[in-house]
Image: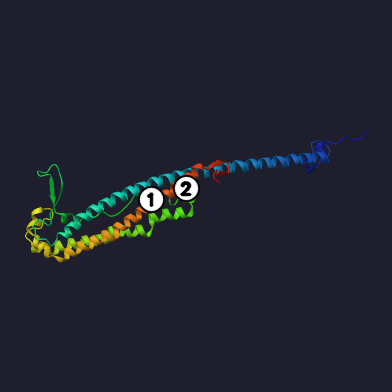
Amino acid sequence: MAKKDNRDDLPWFIKLFTLGDRFDIQDFFDRLKKSVLEFFILVFGVTVSFGIEQQGGESDNRHDGIENLENLREEVDKMIAYTDEYIETIDWVYDMFFNQYERWEQDNDSIYIDFMPDDEEPDGKYYFPPMANYTQRMPFSPPRVNYDAIKLDGTFRLLPKEVGLKMTDIYDGTDLGYLMENTTSIEARYVNQFIDRVGNKWVYDLDIVDLDDNEFWIKNRRYIQKDKLIKYNLFKRLELWEYDIKEQLQAYKQELVESTEMLDSVIAIRDSEIEFIWWVLNPKD
């Protein structure tokens, strides 16, 4: 009688490929196919899970980027409002000091006194010396909180190149740089010259120097008229306002308006896109 093969007597490498006591080629290939299939299912599952997780992070970043663009759009509106208010202020200040310059040579003790309507005053007018406010400055500094917060976080990747360049220009461009310089260091030069003149000459030539006192300007009208340095200083500051700052403000506002149109277009396109797993579909494409 033939001796029955025992699985325990089989070599270890044979046991790996057969379920029975003997090595079976068909059984080997069946188990191999099963193992390969299970391996690919496992790899595919892990890959898909990782891809979905990664895509989820990218999707969150994309939504954050769109929200940042909308916040940036709101900030540009604030910049336009700020610029409009600044233009209005500059126009008012320019007119006041231009009228002062035009009256400079008149033979009238009240040429350095102006007025504005005020119902609380006895005659409905508030009288004041414009030159007392000559040291006041208002550097141009539009809001830029959102831009500074997002310019390094990748949000600009959602913008076409020309739109990204436009946004960089209105926040960090040379035109804005010149405007800010003119309303800070350049204008400060004229203000400081006026302050130095008053402190180094007027205080020695006049009994009392009180620029806020209407009577000071009335009493010393002839002396002030003869101070050609002060008049020339006023002339140069008026030129700065008229031919540099006011024109730059108008040009900058136009740049801001153009940027809002560009941002509106980009945001509308991004909002119309449909996300499907790994793909972002644009129905307009």
Q: Quadrant of the N terminus?
A: top right
Residue that mark 2 sits on: 266
Contact? badges 2 and 1 (CB < 8 Å) = no
Tell which of 243 and 205 is nearer to you.
Answer: 243
For the residue carrying disc 2, how many other residues have a C-alpha within 10 Å: few (<14), some (14-19), or many (20+)? some
Mark 2 or 1, which is nearer the eye?
1
Residue indicated by mark 1: 257
Q: Quadrant of residue 104?
A: bottom left
Where's residue 129, x and y in %?
14, 54
Q: Judge left or right: residue 141 versus residue 59.
A: left
Residue type at tag 2: Val
Q: Is residue 195 above or below residue 7?
A: below
Q: Amino acid at mark 1?
A: Val
**In the rendered image of this protein, does residue 177 appear above or below residue 56?**
below
What is the x, y in percent for residue 173? 38, 58
Image quadrant in which you'd find residue 252: bottom left
**Residue 226 drawn at (x, y percent):** 11, 65
